[in-house]
Amino acid sequence: MNPRLLLATLALPFFASAQDTALHEYISDDQPWKEAASGYAFTDGLCTDAAGNLFFTDVKAGKGIYKIDAATGKTDLFLDNLPGISGLQIGPDGRFYACHNKEQRIIAITMKGDVEVLLTGVKCNDLVVSKKGHLYFTETPTQSIHLITADKKHIVADTGHIVKPNGITISTDEATLVASEHGGKNVWAWRIEEDGTLTAGAPYMTMWLPVGKETASGDGATTESKGRYFVTTELGIQIFDPTGRLSGIIAKPVADGKVVSVEFAGKDHDLLFVAAGDKIFSRKMKVTGYFR
């Protein structure tokens, strides 16, 4: 048997019931996935604030940025007239930073809805902003990672290496950037230099593959407070430790569904949220997210 197929076959009991021993460090059997929001077309762009409120978008049919209140669980439209956002995060200055995919631009948005255009003419997918204010985003069609520095200089930080880059996140010490391949099997890592530029890029983590497939469909990514990376894939949410080793795979809320974006939120940042098509689900965790 092909070693890759054998690996994928062995993975099936590992993730399907979320019962693997390693996963007991992260999840409890009596805390299943719960529906947090529904009635959308294609949810994406999960991000959180210091209070643990979750913000998200509906890329296909939404009006703007939606909010799930950490205290009440109620969902409301937070900012209107911003359709087509695929990546979202709150930066160190308290503004939203967004991949406005529909308009092919990167924007910053105040909590009142005032928009600053940072870059145009890019087919942006997802982004992350460091504490220093450096913004990194993936451009899937061109296989590129871009940087907009804190002083608003645009640099193509890496191109032609990662296969269809998608989800992107940063290490807890903010010294490493990671991005998942949607068209391959790797999660790449780069060293972040003092000026924000990237060096030493390499395929650092290997995602497990579905049986008979050559790609893992890596998508959204986030970082846990102890430095582990959570990456959404076709098999579920794959967890990697800081050394790049696979720690476990959390089963998807809907077995035959998809998960595209992932984020820790809730008042204690211990609820793992996933965007799963027309719904958003949450699950109580034993670990917390890394909030910048």
Image (cartoon, rainbow, N blue to C red):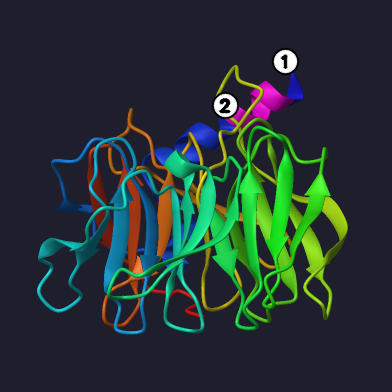
Judge by depth and name the residue closer to the eye, 160 or 179: 160
- Is residue 123 on the magenta stretch? no
For the magenta stretch, what is the residue range? 4-8
Q: Can residue 245 be seen in this view?
A: no
Question: Mainly helix, strand or loop, the magenta region?
Answer: helix
Three-letter amino acid code at disc 2? Thr
The answer to whether the residue labelled 1 contacts the one labelled 2, judged by CB atoms less than 8 Å apart, is yes
5 within the magenta span: yes
Q: Which of 160 and 81 is in front in this view?
A: 81
Q: Where is residue 15 in the image (x, y as percent from the top left)?
A: 45, 42
Q: Residue at x 72, y 38 (%)?
A: 143
Residue 266 image position (x, y, % from top left): 27, 74
Mark 2 crowd level (few <14, some 14–19, many ≥20, 10 Å Cα): some
Reading the chain from its start, which is encountered first: label 1 or label 2?
A: 1
Q: What residue type is labelled 1?
A: Met
In-image side of 146 versus 277 (left or right): right
Question: Is residue 36 depicted above or below 61 in this figure?
Answer: below
Q: Is 239 on the left or on the right of 241, as rendered?
A: left
Crowd class of label 1 (few under 14; some 14 to 19; many from 20; radius 10 Å): few
Residue ID at (72%, 15%): 1
Q: Name the residue under label 2.
A: 9
The residue that disc 1 covers is 1
Mark 1: secondary structure: loop
Q: Report the disc number at residue 205.
A: none
For the residues marked 1 and 2, what is the alpha-carbon distance in whole angstroms? 10 Å
Q: Tell me how many marks there are.
A: 2
The residue sitting at 58% across, 32% down in the picture is 10
